[in-house]
Amino acid sequence: MISIITPVHNSETFIASCIQNVIDQGCPDIEHIIVDGGSTDGTLELIKRYADEYAHIHWISEKDKGQSDAMNKGISIANGELLGVLNADDYYEPGAINRAVQLLQDLPEPSFLAGNCNIWNHVDELIGINKPSHLKLEQLLKGWCVHPFPYNPSAYFYHASLHQSAGLFDINEHYAMDLEFILRAVQFANVYYFDEAWGNFRVHEDTKTFRSKSNGEPMARMNRIMRHYRKRLNPVSRLKVACVYEYYSDENVRKVKQGLKSAFGF
Protein backbone atom coordinates (compact mmCIF):
# COMPACT_ATOMS: atom_id res chain seq x y z
CA MET A 1 0.00 0.00 0.00
CA ILE A 2 1.05 3.60 -0.58
CA SER A 3 -0.01 6.37 1.80
CA ILE A 4 -0.34 9.92 0.49
CA ILE A 5 -0.16 12.57 3.21
CA THR A 6 -1.80 15.97 2.65
CA PRO A 7 -1.30 18.70 5.27
CA VAL A 8 -3.88 21.45 4.87
CA HIS A 9 -5.13 24.61 6.55
CA ASN A 10 -7.73 26.97 5.11
CA SER A 11 -7.34 25.78 1.52
CA GLU A 12 -10.90 25.42 0.27
CA THR A 13 -9.76 26.78 -3.11
CA PHE A 14 -7.57 23.75 -3.79
CA ILE A 15 -8.45 20.85 -1.48
CA ALA A 16 -11.19 19.36 -3.67
CA SER A 17 -8.95 19.29 -6.76
CA CYS A 18 -6.15 17.78 -4.65
CA ILE A 19 -8.39 14.96 -3.42
CA GLN A 20 -9.76 14.38 -6.92
CA ASN A 21 -6.24 14.29 -8.35
CA VAL A 22 -5.35 11.41 -6.04
CA ILE A 23 -8.58 9.62 -6.94
CA ASP A 24 -7.88 10.05 -10.64
CA GLN A 25 -4.50 8.34 -10.25
CA GLY A 26 -6.42 5.06 -10.19
CA CYS A 27 -4.06 3.41 -7.74
CA PRO A 28 -5.72 0.19 -6.45
CA ASP A 29 -3.94 0.01 -3.08
CA ILE A 30 -3.79 3.48 -1.60
CA GLU A 31 -4.87 5.58 1.36
CA HIS A 32 -5.08 9.35 1.34
CA ILE A 33 -4.52 10.82 4.80
CA ILE A 34 -5.54 14.46 5.09
CA VAL A 35 -4.32 16.32 8.17
CA ASP A 36 -6.26 19.53 8.68
CA GLY A 37 -4.85 22.10 11.07
CA GLY A 38 -8.21 23.38 12.26
CA SER A 39 -9.42 25.19 9.14
CA THR A 40 -12.02 27.91 9.60
CA ASP A 41 -13.13 28.14 5.95
CA GLY A 42 -14.90 25.44 3.94
CA THR A 43 -11.93 23.08 3.76
CA LEU A 44 -13.16 20.56 6.32
CA GLU A 45 -16.64 20.33 4.80
CA LEU A 46 -15.13 19.43 1.44
CA ILE A 47 -12.87 16.82 3.04
CA LYS A 48 -15.82 15.22 4.84
CA ARG A 49 -17.87 15.13 1.65
CA TYR A 50 -15.19 13.17 -0.19
CA ALA A 51 -14.41 10.93 2.80
CA ASP A 52 -18.06 9.92 3.03
CA GLU A 53 -17.91 8.72 -0.56
CA TYR A 54 -14.41 7.22 -0.79
CA ALA A 55 -13.20 4.69 1.78
CA HIS A 56 -9.50 5.28 1.04
CA ILE A 57 -9.71 8.84 2.42
CA HIS A 58 -8.94 9.32 6.12
CA TRP A 59 -8.71 12.63 7.91
CA ILE A 60 -8.03 14.32 11.21
CA SER A 61 -8.63 17.95 12.14
CA GLU A 62 -6.93 19.63 15.08
CA LYS A 63 -4.55 22.44 15.86
CA ASP A 64 -0.94 21.69 15.04
CA LYS A 65 2.49 23.30 15.23
CA GLY A 66 2.77 23.90 11.50
CA GLN A 67 3.15 21.98 8.26
CA SER A 68 5.95 19.72 9.46
CA ASP A 69 3.94 18.71 12.52
CA ALA A 70 0.92 17.97 10.32
CA MET A 71 2.98 15.76 8.00
CA ASN A 72 4.43 13.90 10.97
CA LYS A 73 0.94 13.25 12.31
CA GLY A 74 -0.07 11.78 8.98
CA ILE A 75 3.04 9.63 8.78
CA SER A 76 2.44 8.31 12.29
CA ILE A 77 -0.96 6.86 11.34
CA ALA A 78 -0.08 5.78 7.81
CA ASN A 79 -0.49 2.09 6.98
CA GLY A 80 1.44 2.08 3.73
CA GLU A 81 4.90 0.68 3.19
CA LEU A 82 5.37 3.51 0.70
CA LEU A 83 4.88 7.23 1.27
CA GLY A 84 4.24 10.41 -0.66
CA VAL A 85 3.33 13.93 0.42
CA LEU A 86 0.98 16.09 -1.61
CA ASN A 87 0.28 19.66 -0.55
CA ALA A 88 -3.29 20.80 -1.10
CA ASP A 89 -2.40 23.22 -3.89
CA ASP A 90 -0.13 20.84 -5.83
CA TYR A 91 -0.97 17.85 -8.01
CA TYR A 92 0.43 14.71 -9.60
CA GLU A 93 0.89 13.99 -13.27
CA PRO A 94 -1.39 11.17 -14.54
CA GLY A 95 -0.04 7.78 -13.49
CA ALA A 96 2.64 9.18 -11.17
CA ILE A 97 1.60 7.20 -8.10
CA ASN A 98 1.31 3.88 -9.93
CA ARG A 99 4.72 4.50 -11.48
CA ALA A 100 6.26 5.17 -8.07
CA VAL A 101 4.67 2.03 -6.61
CA GLN A 102 5.95 -0.05 -9.51
CA LEU A 103 9.50 1.23 -9.05
CA LEU A 104 9.66 1.11 -5.26
CA GLN A 105 8.40 -2.46 -5.10
CA ASP A 106 11.58 -3.59 -6.86
CA LEU A 107 14.03 -1.38 -4.97
CA PRO A 108 15.87 -2.15 -1.71
CA GLU A 109 14.62 -0.56 1.50
CA PRO A 110 14.82 2.21 2.25
CA SER A 111 14.82 3.88 -1.14
CA PHE A 112 14.07 7.48 -2.09
CA LEU A 113 13.19 8.26 -5.68
CA ALA A 114 12.56 11.55 -7.39
CA GLY A 115 11.18 12.61 -10.73
CA ASN A 116 10.71 15.98 -12.40
CA CYS A 117 8.40 18.68 -11.09
CA ASN A 118 6.69 21.33 -13.21
CA ILE A 119 6.56 24.78 -11.59
CA TRP A 120 3.57 27.01 -12.40
CA ASN A 121 2.93 30.65 -11.56
CA HIS A 122 -0.29 32.29 -10.41
CA VAL A 123 -1.72 32.49 -13.93
CA ASP A 124 -0.91 28.85 -14.77
CA GLU A 125 2.16 29.60 -16.86
CA LEU A 126 4.98 27.05 -16.74
CA ILE A 127 7.97 28.92 -15.34
CA GLY A 128 10.37 26.04 -14.80
CA ILE A 129 10.97 22.31 -14.46
CA ASN A 130 12.81 20.98 -11.44
CA LYS A 131 15.09 18.09 -12.49
CA PRO A 132 16.94 16.82 -9.38
CA SER A 133 19.26 14.45 -11.20
CA HIS A 134 22.00 14.35 -8.53
CA LEU A 135 20.85 13.21 -5.09
CA LYS A 136 23.97 12.32 -3.10
CA LEU A 137 24.60 14.51 -0.06
CA GLU A 138 27.83 16.02 -1.34
CA GLN A 139 26.21 16.82 -4.67
CA LEU A 140 23.17 18.51 -3.13
CA LEU A 141 25.31 20.59 -0.79
CA LYS A 142 26.94 22.30 -3.76
CA GLY A 143 23.74 24.28 -4.09
CA TRP A 144 20.68 24.88 -6.22
CA CYS A 145 22.59 26.23 -9.23
CA VAL A 146 24.84 23.18 -9.43
CA HIS A 147 22.61 20.29 -8.35
CA PRO A 148 19.01 21.32 -7.51
CA PHE A 149 17.30 19.37 -4.76
CA PRO A 150 13.77 17.96 -5.28
CA TYR A 151 11.78 21.17 -5.08
CA ASN A 152 8.37 19.80 -4.16
CA PRO A 153 7.12 16.54 -2.59
CA SER A 154 4.64 15.96 -5.43
CA ALA A 155 7.63 14.62 -7.38
CA TYR A 156 9.23 12.25 -4.89
CA PHE A 157 8.25 9.06 -3.06
CA TYR A 158 10.02 6.74 -0.63
CA HIS A 159 9.76 3.70 1.63
CA ALA A 160 8.07 4.52 4.94
CA SER A 161 10.89 2.68 6.72
CA LEU A 162 13.19 5.58 5.80
CA HIS A 163 11.77 7.53 8.75
CA GLN A 164 13.07 4.90 11.13
CA SER A 165 16.63 5.84 10.26
CA ALA A 166 16.32 9.44 9.05
CA GLY A 167 13.67 10.64 11.50
CA LEU A 168 10.57 12.70 10.80
CA PHE A 169 10.21 16.26 9.50
CA ASP A 170 11.64 18.96 11.75
CA ILE A 171 8.67 20.65 13.43
CA ASN A 172 10.81 23.74 14.10
CA GLU A 173 11.38 24.21 10.37
CA HIS A 174 8.48 25.99 8.66
CA TYR A 175 9.97 27.08 5.33
CA ALA A 176 12.65 24.64 4.19
CA MET A 177 11.40 21.42 5.78
CA ASP A 178 11.63 19.57 2.46
CA LEU A 179 15.29 20.46 1.97
CA GLU A 180 16.18 19.69 5.57
CA PHE A 181 14.51 16.27 5.44
CA ILE A 182 16.03 15.38 2.07
CA LEU A 183 19.56 16.19 3.24
CA ARG A 184 19.01 13.80 6.16
CA ALA A 185 17.21 11.16 4.12
CA VAL A 186 19.82 10.77 1.37
CA GLN A 187 22.38 9.80 3.99
CA PHE A 188 20.37 6.65 4.77
CA ALA A 189 18.45 5.89 1.57
CA ASN A 190 19.23 4.32 -1.75
CA VAL A 191 18.56 7.30 -4.01
CA TYR A 192 17.27 7.22 -7.59
CA TYR A 193 16.31 9.87 -10.12
CA PHE A 194 13.97 9.27 -13.05
CA ASP A 195 13.79 11.78 -15.86
CA GLU A 196 9.99 11.71 -15.91
CA ALA A 197 7.36 14.32 -15.01
CA TRP A 198 5.66 13.28 -11.76
CA GLY A 199 4.61 16.42 -9.93
CA ASN A 200 3.30 19.95 -10.29
CA PHE A 201 4.03 22.83 -7.92
CA ARG A 202 1.89 25.97 -7.91
CA VAL A 203 3.55 29.21 -6.79
CA HIS A 204 0.83 31.71 -5.86
CA GLU A 205 0.17 34.49 -3.36
CA ASP A 206 -0.88 32.12 -0.58
CA THR A 207 2.33 30.07 -0.66
CA LYS A 208 5.15 30.59 1.82
CA THR A 209 7.46 31.40 -1.10
CA PHE A 210 5.31 34.40 -1.92
CA ARG A 211 4.63 35.55 1.64
CA SER A 212 8.30 35.49 2.63
CA LYS A 213 9.70 37.06 -0.53
CA SER A 214 10.36 40.50 0.95
CA ASN A 215 12.65 39.52 3.83
CA GLY A 216 14.88 36.92 2.15
CA GLU A 217 13.83 34.32 4.72
CA PRO A 218 13.88 31.26 2.40
CA MET A 219 17.44 31.91 1.20
CA ALA A 220 18.70 32.59 4.73
CA ARG A 221 17.19 29.35 5.98
CA MET A 222 18.56 27.41 3.03
CA ASN A 223 22.07 28.74 3.69
CA ARG A 224 21.82 27.81 7.36
CA ILE A 225 20.67 24.27 6.59
CA MET A 226 23.33 23.77 3.92
CA ARG A 227 26.11 24.88 6.26
CA HIS A 228 24.79 22.61 9.02
CA TYR A 229 24.85 19.49 6.85
CA ARG A 230 28.16 20.44 5.28
CA LYS A 231 29.70 19.52 8.64
CA ARG A 232 28.82 15.88 7.92
CA LEU A 233 31.44 15.76 5.16
CA ASN A 234 35.11 14.98 5.62
CA PRO A 235 37.37 18.07 5.80
CA VAL A 236 38.52 17.94 2.18
CA SER A 237 35.01 17.49 0.78
CA ARG A 238 33.68 20.13 3.15
CA LEU A 239 36.14 22.73 1.88
CA LYS A 240 35.50 21.84 -1.75
CA VAL A 241 31.74 21.97 -1.37
CA ALA A 242 31.91 25.24 0.59
CA CYS A 243 33.95 26.88 -2.14
CA VAL A 244 31.51 25.77 -4.83
CA TYR A 245 28.46 26.80 -2.82
CA GLU A 246 29.79 30.22 -1.88
CA TYR A 247 31.00 30.86 -5.43
CA TYR A 248 27.50 30.28 -6.75
CA SER A 249 25.68 31.98 -3.85
CA ASP A 250 25.19 35.22 -5.76
CA GLU A 251 23.89 33.21 -8.70
CA ASN A 252 21.51 31.43 -6.33
CA VAL A 253 20.10 34.75 -5.19
CA ARG A 254 19.82 35.99 -8.75
CA LYS A 255 17.93 32.89 -9.86
CA VAL A 256 15.54 33.04 -6.93
CA LYS A 257 14.78 36.68 -7.65
CA GLN A 258 14.36 35.94 -11.34
CA GLY A 259 11.99 33.08 -10.55
CA LEU A 260 9.90 35.25 -8.26
CA LYS A 261 9.78 37.98 -10.87
CA SER A 262 8.57 35.50 -13.49
CA ALA A 263 5.98 34.09 -11.11
CA PHE A 264 4.59 37.28 -9.65
CA GLY A 265 5.84 40.17 -11.76
CA PHE A 266 7.80 42.00 -9.04
Image: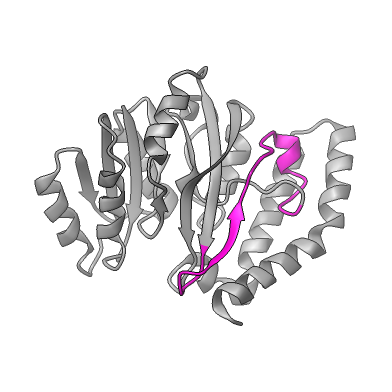
Span shown in magenta: 120-145
Decide which of 244, 62 is in the foreground and name it: 244
State the quadrant of the N terminus.
Answer: top left
Horizontally, residue 244 falls left or right of residue 10, namely right
Q: Quadrant of the rendered structure where residue 15 is?
A: bottom left
Q: Position of residue 19 (x, y in %)?
A: 26, 51
Q: Is residue 161 visible?
A: no
State the quadrant of the C terminus.
Answer: bottom right
Q: Quadrant of the rendered structure where residue 233 is?
A: top right
**At x 48% / y 42%, what residue is drawn?**
169
**At x 46% / y 54%, what residue is drawn?**
200
Horizontally, residue 232 falls left or right of residue 234, namely left
Decide which of 159, 10 is in the foreground and name it: 159
Q: Main secondary structure of the magenta part?
A: loop
Q: Position of residue 33 (x, y in %)?
A: 28, 42
**At x 52% / y 55%, what residue is drawn?**
118
Query: What is the tally of numbered marks visible in this picture?
Result: 0
From the viewer's perspective, is residue 62 above or below residue 76?
A: below
Q: Position of residue 206 (x, y in %)?
A: 43, 71
**At x 53% / y 50%, what residue is drawn?**
117
Horizontally, residue 4 falls left or right of residue 113, namely left
Q: Is residue 59 visible?
A: yes
Q: Quadrant of the rendered structure where residue 188 is?
A: top right
Residue 93 among those drawn in magenta: no
Residue 137 among those drawn in magenta: yes
Q: Position of residue 90 (x, y in %)?
A: 41, 56
From the viewer's perspective, is residue 217 above or below residue 201?
A: below
